[in-house]
Structures are given as structure tokens and as C-alpha cells.
Image (spheres, coloured by chain):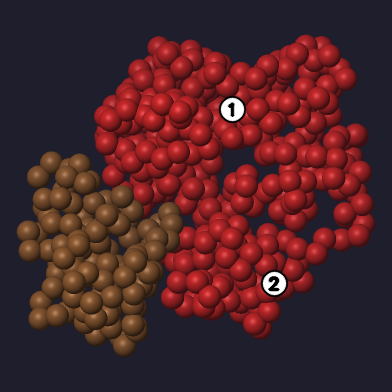
Chain colours: A red, B brown
């Protein structure tokens, strides 16, 4: 079966369909949500290794003598602290302090930065950056130039050991190098969205099928599985990594989302800084909180949270945690609610007992 | 794949009628589309259900899906074993994974449901 004609396809679309993946429309992309079993794919990453096609993710390249000035202007983290070959988690904000997107900033050279952005936000982010570019830095909407393959899990290292030189393999967490993998030029970054060790590989679309097959072959002895966006979501939820449109969006600020650690107010001006300073002075009223269900039921995105029978917040992401074997979720709640508070998640009009718990739900052993 | 004696709906439920009582579940195709099933909300015994109205909820890891009553009547039994082992809907959707039994109030409704052959053609699976 072929992909619906109106959807965007990654270079691995035919591979997914040949593997019998269940395909869904994900923000206009025809993407694999699962291949065999979401739970098995999730557990493969937690216990062994999994490979994901994340070629739908967007890339924006910023170049020129004023590249750093522009990146500093539009992002909340301090990109001046990056060494060449280092990456940082950051965000684009509106003037009012809400999120345009969360992004990864990679410093390729003194005059070149590489931003990895959410697929569905790529055009919006590109427009936002170009509209706030008094520096005449060159900004390129580079998504079509790159496929992206993520290899995640404690045995990702063993898998890639067969495909990478030692220098490339020993890149530290949140660092990257441009090099060759399985004979293919790639940007090899030790980053991920699963809470495990792992790599994200950026490469030319025409090489994606070759590299995918090489990774699957290299990982066979380690029990590698191709993993879909379903497992990607449950993995990132356990690790409490935000998902745009859920934990973060235009009406949420980094203080509320618990992302204080990426905001560097002392780096100088950036878009949204004034609003963040005011919010900090006034204090926030709601905060991203974890919950686990005690009763029977599953909290889903958008469900109401009640405390003592009164509406108190809403679920941003929720579902079963294959690792913890519990029903978990994240929600926005008044920030004066203590951990361990009894709450109710309203599931189809019925209150299901739950309690607030600290985030993240899962942290890998180092 | 699809028992010949059952009737089916385009919403992917199956119905097996015996002595005026319909046993209802979701089809093999439905469970495959949903993926790993982790929670089933069965109707309460004694509830009156109406054809095409929600009468149960099946949740996969990803999402909650309403299950529509393929026939009208009174719930006379629900499969309470699904509370502990919802995965029966994946492993044995047409037998052990039944959801509820309904005493038919409008038995003619059954006649309009799909045969196994028609349902198989509808979902486009080879037999």
C-alpha cells in the first residue's frame, strides 16, 4: 500500500511499509506509529536498543559573522557557552514569554549554528527567526536537506561501535561530530528524546535507506527493534521530556513548564526576556506536575484534574508507562499543590483517584 | 479468521446471538488497528444500551476508543476478567475477549449486520 498522496513522506517511507508498520498522519507526515507492538518497542529501547526514523523533524541553519548574535536574540539558552561540536536544549519564545517551539542548538562553527526543530513547527520557526533577524545572518529552512535517524538505548553504543570510528563513538552527551557512519557522511550527535543513551544522526535523504539497514543489521545481535512514534511518545513521557502542543505551547512559559534551567536571563536580551522577568517577579500560578493513577482508568491529554471536587488543572500527556507498569501523566496544576496530594483525573465524567508525584517518572542509571 | 456464525459491523464489532442474547466483542482487525490494549471499560449489568451508542471503551497505549453497541437491549453479563487481563482482546478477540452480553430488545437489528464474508471484504483482508 502506498502513502496517501497528500501526506509528506520521509525517505524511509517504503521501508516502513515493507516492514508492515502501522502508518498515521502525524502533523501532515505519513509516519510509522508502531511496527509490531508499541510496548515491545518501548521495552527494547529501555532494555536494549531501538532505531527510529525521525526525518520529519525540521532543521534550520544559521550562518554568517552574526550567526551567534541571531541565535542569542531568538533563543532562551546561552549559545555563547557552546564549544564547536556541542549542542544545547533551548527554546524560541514570543515577546509575551510563551513558546514558539523547543529546539536543539548545535554549534557547527563560529559562524554556523544548526537548529533541530519540531516537524510541525518548522515553517513557523523559520518565519519567526527571519522576522527577528536585524543582524543579516543567513537563515535557511534546511529540512529537505536532512533525513534523521535516532538510535537509542543502552546498547546503542554497542550497535554503533560496529559502524563508527572510536573518535566518533566516544563523543560525549550533548556533543556531536561530522563524520562518516557505515560509509555515509552524517552529523553524529549524542542526543535523544527517550531518556536513554543514544545518538541522533543527520544525513542526506538519499543515504537514509542504506544507513537504516546497516544499523538494523549491526543491532541484530543486540536485539534492536525498529520503533515508531508511539514508543517515542511513551519513552519521552516517562522521562518527562516536553512535547510541543502538550506540555509547551504559546500560552505556557518556561517557568510553568519547569524549564527554568534552560533560561539564561543574564546572557542579555532575547525575545521574551522582559516578560519572563516580570513573570518571575509576580510569581507563577501553575506548574507542570506529574501524577500517577491509583484507581482504575487512564488520564489522557486534555482531561480535567480535580482536587476536592473542584477543577484544578488539565492533563497534558498521559497513558500507561510500560517501564513502571502504572498509568502516569503530566498536568498543569496550581503551583502550591504539594507532591503526594490526592487528586482526581476526570475520565469520561468519572473521577479516578490519583496523586501528584515528582518528575521525571524514569531516570536511567548512569 | 472471522467466525461464519457471527455478524459484524463496519465499526469493527462482532455479534454472536444465542437464545435472544448477543455476545459482543471487537474484531481481529479492530484489535490490530488499536495495538496493545491496556484497559477495557465494560458496561454495568442491567444497563440498557441503544444501537450505535457508546457502551464500552477500549484503550490502547496510545488512545481511548469508544465501542458502539451493535444492537439494542439490556446488558445481562459483562466480561469482568478484562479488568485484570485486557490483553485478551489482542490475543483472542473473537472468543475470550468478549466484552458484554446483551438481551436483544429489537432482534431484527441483527439481520442488517454484515456476514463474515461481507466484513472480510469490507476490511480488505485475505482469508
* Rendered image: mark on residue A293: none
Q: Position of residue B66 (x, y in %)?
A: 39, 64
Location of residue A336 by image quarter: bottom right
Looking at the image, which is closer to me, B65 or A136? Answer: B65
Distance between the Cα atoms at labels 2 and 1?
35 Å
For disc 1, the marked residue is A58
A329 on left or right of A138: left
Tell me the residue at 60%/57% (across/down).
Answer: A316
Inspect this view and state whether residue B84 appears: no
Dot 2: few (<14), some (14–19), or many (≥20) neighbours within 10 Å? some
Q: Indicate whether A29 appears above or below A65.
A: below
Q: Indicate whether A126 appears above or below A88.
A: above
- Mark 2 or mark 1, which has the lower sequence index? 1
Q: Position of residue B82 (x, y in %)?
A: 28, 73
Q: Are marks 2 and 1 in contact (CB under 8 Å)?
A: no
Tell me the residue at 30%/57% (across/down).
Answer: B11
> Residue placed farthest to the left in the image?
B4
Tell me the residue at 41%/15% (across/down).
Answer: A207
The chain holding disc 2 is A
* Rendered image: mark on residue A312: 2
Location of residue A49 by image quarter: top left
On-image quarter of the C terminus of chain B: top left
The chain holding disc 1 is A
Q: Position of residue B112 (x, y in %)?
A: 20, 62
Dot 1: few (<14), some (14–19), or many (≥20) neighbours within 10 Å? many
Inspect this view and state whether residue A333 appears: yes
Looking at the image, which is closer to me, B30 or A208? Answer: B30
Identify the element where label 1 is drawn.
strand
Amino acid at each position: 500500500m502506498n502513502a496517501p498522496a497528500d501526506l509528506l513522506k520521509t525517505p524511509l517511507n517504503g521501508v516502513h511499509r515493507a516492514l508492515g508498520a502501522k502508518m498515521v498522519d502525524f502533523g501532515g507526515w505519513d509516519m510509522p506509529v508502531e511496527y509490531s507492538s508499541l510496548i515491545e518497542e518501548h521495552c527494547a529501547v529501555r532494555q536494549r536498543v531501538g532505531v527510529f526514523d525521525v526525518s520529519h523533524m525540521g532543521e534550520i541553519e544559521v550562518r554568517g559573522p552574526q550567526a551567534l548574535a541571531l541565535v542569542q536574540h531568538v533563543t532562551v539558552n546561552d549559545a555563547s557557552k557552546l564549544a564547536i561540536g556541542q549542542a544545547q536544549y533551548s527554546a524560541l519564545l514570543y515577546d509575551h514569554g510563551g513558546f514558539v517551539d523547543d529546539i536543539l542548538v548545535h554549534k557547527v562553527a563560529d559562524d554556523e549554528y544548526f537548529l533541530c526543530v519540531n516537524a510541525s513547527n518548522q515553517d513557523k520557526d523559520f518565519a519567526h527567526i527571519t522576522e527577528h533577524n536585524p543582524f543579516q545572518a543567513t537563515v535557511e529552512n534546511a529540512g529537505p536537506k536532512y533525513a534523521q535517524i535516532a538510535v537509542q538505548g543502552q546498547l546503542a553504543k554497542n550497535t554503533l561501535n560496529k559502524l563508527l570510528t572510536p573518535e566518533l563513538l566516544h563523543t560525549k552527551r550533548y556533543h556531536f561530530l561530522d563524520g562518516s557512519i557505515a560509509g555515509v557522511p552524517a552529523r553524529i550527535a549524542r542526543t535523544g528524546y527517550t531518556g536513554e543513551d543514544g545518538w541522533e544522526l543527520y544525513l542526506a535523504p538519499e543515504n537514509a535507506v542504506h544507513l537504516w539497514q546497516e544499523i538494523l543489521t549491526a543491532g541484530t545481535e543486540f536485539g534492536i527493534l525498529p520503533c515508531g512514534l508511539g514508543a517515542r511518545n511513551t519513552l519521552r513521557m516517562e522521562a518527562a521530556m516536553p512535547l510541543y502542543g502538550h506540555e509547551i505551547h504559546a500560552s505556557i512559559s518556561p517557568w510553568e513548564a519547569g524549564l527554568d534551567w534552560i533560561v539564561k536571563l543574564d546572557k542579555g536580551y532575547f525575545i521574551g526576556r522582559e516578560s519572563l522577568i516580570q513573570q518571575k517577579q509576580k510569581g507563577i500560578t501553575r506548574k507542570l506536575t506529574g501524577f500517577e493513577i491509583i484507581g482504575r482508568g487512564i488520564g489522557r491529554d486534555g482531561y480535567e484534574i480535580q482536587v476536592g471536587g473542584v477543577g484544578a488543572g488539565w492533563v497534558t500527556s498521559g497513558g500507561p508507562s510500560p517501564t513502571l507498569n502504572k498509568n502516569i501523566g503530566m498536568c498543569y496544576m496550581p503551583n502550591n499543590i504539594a507532591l503526594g496530594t490526592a487528586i482526581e483525573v476526570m475520565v469520561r465524567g468519572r473521577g479516578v483517584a490519583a496523586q501528584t508525584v515528582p518528575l521525571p517518572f524514569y531516570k536511567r542509571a548512569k | 479468521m472471522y467466525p461464519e456464525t457471527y455478524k459484524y459491523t463496519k465499526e469493527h464489532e462482532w455479534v454472536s446471538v444465542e437464545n435472544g442474547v448477543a455476545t459482543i466483542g471487537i474484531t481481529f482487525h479492530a484489535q490490530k488497528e488499536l495495538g496493545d490494549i491496556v484497559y477495557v471499560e465494560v458496561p454495568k449489568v442491567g444497563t440498557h444500551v441503544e444501537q450505535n451508542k457508546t457502551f464500552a471503551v477500549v484503550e490502547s497505549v496510545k488512545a481511548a476508543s469508544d465501542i458502539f453497541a451493535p444492537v439494542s437491549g439490556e446488558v445481562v453479563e459483562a466480561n469482568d476478567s478484562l479488568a485484570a487481563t485486557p490483553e485478551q482482546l489482542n490475543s483472542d478477540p473473537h472468543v475470550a475477549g468478549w466484552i458484554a452480553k446483551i438481551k436483544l430488545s429489537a432482534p431484527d437489528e441483527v439481520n442488517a449486520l454484515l456476514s463474515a464474508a461481507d466484513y472480510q471484504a469490507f476490511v480488505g483482508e485475505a482469508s
